[in-house]
Image: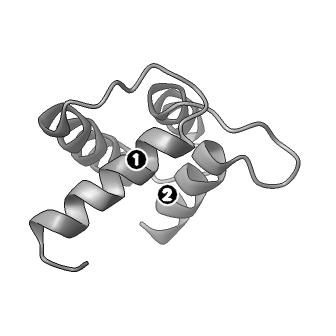
């Protein structure tokens, strides 16, 4: 699961000289790595959780780069759980 989350983080933040991408594109890129570099079941579960949280927060997964939307998602989750 950590490998899936780390890969997602790299995709939305644009590490290693790669451009950041939106949440939706990052999830698509994860799906492409499922079964080769990442466990397909874990990718599916991770993707489902992110999509559910994005939808419930009213965020648009399509815009890019995804770092701003990703930060809004994290802030919303922290507020819901009282971790701020």
- Residue at the spot of label 1: 43
Labels 1 and 2: the sequence-earlier one: 2
User: Gap between marks 1 and 2, in whole Å?
Assistant: 6 Å
CB atoms of marks 1 and 2 within 8 Å = yes
Q: Which mark is residue 4?
A: 2
Q: Quadrant of residue 77 in the image?
A: bottom left
Q: Is residue 7 left or right of residue 62?
A: right
Name the quadrant containing residue 55: top left
User: Which residue occupies the foreground of this view, 28 or 82?
Assistant: 82
Kindly give the residue lying farthest to the bottom in the view shown.
83
**Residue 76, image x, y percentages:** 23, 55
- The x, y position of residue 38, in whole percent, is 54, 52
**Is residue 19 placed above or below 1 in the rendered structure?**
above
What residue is shown at x 46% (from left), y 53% (from top)? 39
Visible residue check, residue 78:
yes
Residue at 21%, 80% (x, y): give it. 83
Residue that appears at 36% across and 48% down: 72
Residue 11 located left or right of residue 60: right
């Amino acid at each position: 699961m950590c490998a899936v989350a780390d890969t997602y983080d790299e995709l939305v933040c644009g590490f290693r000289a790669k451009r950041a991408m939106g949440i939706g594109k990052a999830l698509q890129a994860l799906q492409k790595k499922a079964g080769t570099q990442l466990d397909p079941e874990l990718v599916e579960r991770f993707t489902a959780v992110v999509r559910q949280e994005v939808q419930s927060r009213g965020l648009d997964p399509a815009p890019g780069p995804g770092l701003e939307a990703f930060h809004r998602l994290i802030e919303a989750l922290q507020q819901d759980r009282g971790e701020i």
